[in-house]
Image (tube, rainbow, N blue to C red):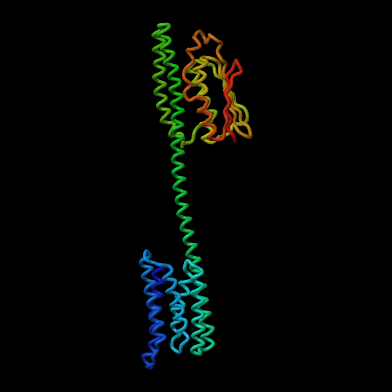
Amino acid sequence: MLRALTWLFRGAGSVLIGVATFGYSAASGRDLIIEAIAFAVGAVVVAYWLVTDLRPEHRQPRVLAGALIVMAAASGFASTGMHGGPLIGFAFMATIGAGAGSSLLAGCVTTAIALVGVEVGALVTGASVTSALGFPLLLIVAFVSGLNRAAYRRQAEQAAAMVAQLEQLRAEQRQVAILDERTRIAREIHDVLAHSLGALGIQLQAARALLAEHGDTGRALSLLDQAQRMAKDGLAETRRAVHALRADTAGLDEQLAALIDTHRIRHHASVSFRVGGQPRPLPPEATVALVRTAQEALVNTAKHAPRQPVDIGLHYSEDGVQMIISNQLPAPGDAHGRPVAFGTVNGGYGLTGMRERLLLIRGTLTAASDGTHWTVTARVPQ
């Protein structure tokens, strides 16, 4: 739209310049050769200017700059003649276009030559002081207007570039968010499956031991029934895990209490649970991280120290939340009448996974043995 208005102004201006310049000459019979030459130069340059705007691939900036200089010089010189005043319009167009161009030097040169042309023409023709001073002032105003137009155009281009960069940044942020969400879902499913399959492996190993070592078919079938229910529960928990990532979850205390009750029933182990400090809601990421850590720690307890007492302590403080899980280690060669090797299976997810999950929320995890107890300590900052 702006380009169309610009060319409407140039085209209509050229027509008006011609009518104003030669209309009086036709009526009075005067011969205006210099004005005719200046008008012809201006008309040709304006036409060339239009062609280069319509076909930018053929534009030669130096040729266009030179053409504007010639137009400014010719029309500036001829404008001080007795009937050439309207030709100053071509010089006006040239200085505006040169000021709005990409080269400040070319704009200054074009304006300077237009000013020189006006003054030389004024000296040759003996033009009035009004023309000798007024026309140069008009050309200077035109040049400043062109500079302002160029500044506005650069600002518009910069704004458009910033908008494009912003859109690109938003697209990249959306992509990062999608990848982060996929990672969180994958990690959550991995943790749920690690817990479920770990507990399932313990039940199956117990059933195998009962059949192979004791021939107790009844108890083995009971364990297999429990394993089947655990597999079903694990699949249901996996489905719920994805929805839980975006839904409000129960409090940390409630989830740990439910987890402990399930562990007591499945593994016939004594688990104590205590809460210290002032309980408060935690971000979903922190709650899930601590619950999964406790879940994995309990599974490892059932694997490596079956039926040994477990103590879970949860303490709220001003700078965060700390969870300590401690269990007794079985005596060498004695695990309630079962070989120690019976409680040792592959670690699965293990401490590395728990530590990585906590690191994502700036938490920490330590695990160590003092010879009689194995203690896992998880901390989540406020």
**Residue 374, image x and y in percent?**
57, 19
Q: Which residue lies at the image location 53% right of the left edge and 9% below the top edge?
A: 334
In the displayed structure, would residue 362 be above or below residue 137?
A: above
In the displayed structure, would residue 86 be above or below residue 371?
A: below
- The reply, left or right, for residue 43 in relation to residue 102 is left
Q: Nearer the viewer, residue 293 or 9?
A: 9
Quarter of the image with the N terminus is: bottom left
**Residue 272, image x and y in percent?**
57, 20
Q: Nearer the viewer, residue 348 or 94?
A: 94
| Quarter assignment of residue 382 | top right
In the displayed structure, would residue 23 be above or below residue 163?
A: below
**Residue 103, image x and y in percent?**
49, 67
The answer to whether residue 275 of the structure is visible from this angle is yes
State how many labels appear. Answer: 0
Q: Which residue lies at the image location 44% right of the left edge and 34% below the top edge?
A: 185
Q: Nearer the viewer, residue 159 or 284?
A: 159
Q: Which residue lies at the image location 44% right of the left edge and 81% below the top edge?
A: 75
In the displayed structure, would residue 156 be above or below residue 209?
A: below
* Most distant residue in the bottom direction: 28
Q: Which residue lies at the image location 56% right of the left edge and 35% below the top edge?
A: 362
The answer to whether residue 255 of the structure is visible from this angle is no
**Residue 158, image x and y in percent?**
49, 59
| Quarter assignment of residue 11 | bottom left
